[in-house]
Image: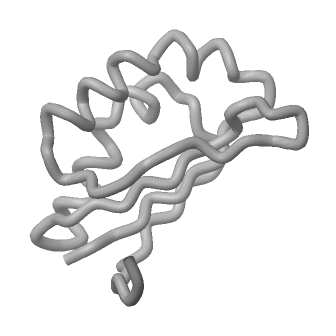
């Protein structure tokens, strides 16, 4: 079951993102459920949020993944959406 994790960073938290980026990327690699991911960028080209597509057993597993992401644990996000997603193209 695929889920999209869509986040928006808190204003002024780019240093929090940078400080936790390696741990976030390691978590993605370690867990093995992320099919694609990347940051949103603001008009100045700075990272400002994330889009993560994961394939997990159910919503509870997706929520657990999101809750344990190092970015979430560091308090990076202002807003978080978790939506079930169906792949049609790609």
Q: Residue visible at 41% across and 84% down?
A: 89
Rendering coords of residue 23 (x, y %): 33, 19
Left or right, 62 with reference to 85: left
Asked if 75 appears above or below 48 in the picture, the reply is above
Rendering coords of residue 74 (x, y %): 47, 22
Q: Residue visible at 36% across and 79% down?
A: 84
Rendering coords of residue 32 (x, y %): 14, 45
Q: Residue furthest right?
A: 43
Left or right, 6 with reference to 12: left
Viewer-proximal residue among 7 and 28: 28
> What colouring does the structure picture have?
one colour
Q: Residue visible at 42% across and 66% down?
A: 4
Rendering coords of residue 28 (x, y %): 26, 37
Left or right, 8 with reference to 53: right
Q: How many marks?
A: 0
Viewer-proximal residue among 74 and 17: 17
User: Picture quarter containing residue 10?
Assistant: top right
Viewer-proximal residue among 49 and 88: 88
In which quadrant will I find the C terminus?
A: bottom left
Q: Residue visible at 88% across and 33% down?
A: 44
Asked if 90 appears above or below 27 in the picture, the reply is below
Q: Residue furthest bottom?
A: 88
Q: Residue furthest front?
A: 90
In which quadrant will I find the N terminus?
A: bottom left
Asked if 53 appears above or below 69 in the picture, the reply is below
């Amino acid at each position: 079951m695929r889920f999209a994790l869509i986040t928006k960073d808190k204003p002024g938290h780019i240093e929090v993102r940078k400080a936790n980026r390696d741990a976030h990327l390691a978590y993605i690699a370690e867990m093995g459920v992320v099919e694609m991911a990347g940051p949103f960028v603001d008009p100045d080209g700075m990272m400002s949020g994330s889009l993560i597509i994961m394939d997990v057993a159910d919503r509870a597993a997706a929520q657990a993944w999101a809750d344990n992401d190092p970015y979430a644990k560091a308090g990076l996000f202002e807003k978080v959406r978790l939506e079930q997603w169906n792949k049609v193209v790609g």
